[in-house]
Image (spheres, rainbow, N blue to C red):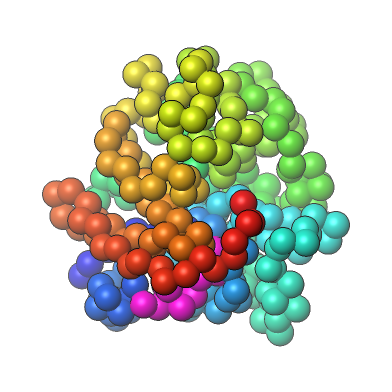
Amino acid sequence: MAVYAIGDIQGCYDQLQALLEQIAFDPARDRLWFAGDLVNRGPRSLETLRLARSLNAICVLGNHDMHLLAAATVPRALKKKDTLRQILDAPDAGPLLDWLRQRPLLHHDGELDYTLIHAGLPPQWDLASARARAAEVECVLRGDDRHEFFAHMYGNQPDRWSPSLSGMERLRFITNCFTRLRFCDSEGRLALEEKGAPGSQPAHLRPWFAWPQRRSRDARILFGHWSTLGAYDGDGVHALDTGCLWGGKLTAARLDAASPRRFIYACPEVVNPGCG
């Protein structure tokens, strides 16, 4: 049995199928982990979501997956650049959205010793803290209060963790870490507006995983979300988003080995130019 973790797909279903063929994926034998952002901006989000559900894949929620769930609850959340209408209008939209809503923000496999998230963790959280914070939001997503949550999910504040945060501010901060974080300062203050590659940011910021005081350094973390970072292995993390949507690559990392072995599918074209 092989276990593969795959970076952001964002509706690039044909490219995903090509990568699965390249690695000779056998659904009867192998397992898939997805680093979030199954959907949006690419042309075949509906087929991608259906495939992930049919394979019973492990998938953590990314910002575009959360946006889909919000749009299904608060229709005004939809944007012109979104390609989510195909899902919302599908005859099986209900079961697909219910399945997606049950996905975690963090998945930890003690046997393989890997932790999967979509974006990042602030330096104040160790793995146990991160799992507890993820569970807070997951509980809301699966409960009756999710409508209020989605109505107030968007926003960049608060930008720094405090155990005293409560209510929607606490949930928004947690969600932003798991689904949007790239850079932060030495105190863990999120810089969510910075989306470029390392080196493009102001001097007081670093990638979330690069701070030496980061309390999750003992965990082996897989993540996506950061196409301008690309493939990266270091600081105890493995980055999986290699920019398929932008004509880059789609990456699978095989996890059932001493170190992740990468498989790369070079995407032949830009799927949706100009959509960040």
- Is the residue 233 above or below the residue 169 in the image? below
Compare residues 105 and 13 and report the one nearer the observer. Answer: 13
Q: How many marks?
A: 0
The residue segment tinted magenta is 10-18
Compare residues 103 and 211 and report the one nearer the observer. Answer: 211
Residue at coordinates 60% horizontally, 74% vertically from top-left? 43
Does residue 155 show up?
Answer: yes
Q: Position of residue 145 (x, y in %)?
A: 77, 49
Q: Position of residue 246 (x, y in %)?
A: 50, 59
Residue lying furthest right? 76
* Side of 262 where 178 appears, left or right: right
Residue at coordinates 71% horizontally, 84% vertically from top-left? 91
Residue lying furthest left? 258
- Is the residue 210 above or below the residue 11 in the image? above
* Side of 180 where 263 appears, left or right: left
Quadrant hosting residue 165: top right
Residue at coordinates 51% horizontally, 27% vertically from top-left? 201
Quadrant hosting residue 96: bottom right
* Side of 252 where 272 appears, left or right: right
Quarter of the rendering occupied by the N terminus: bottom left
Predominant secondary structure in magenta?
Answer: helix
On whether residue 12 falls in the magenta region, the answer is yes
Does residue 220 show up?
Answer: no
Compare residues 143 and 118 and report the one nearer the observer. Answer: 118
Q: Position of residue 139 (x, y in %)?
A: 62, 47
On whether residue 23 falls in the magenta region, the answer is no
- Is the residue 67 above or below the residue 234 in the image? below
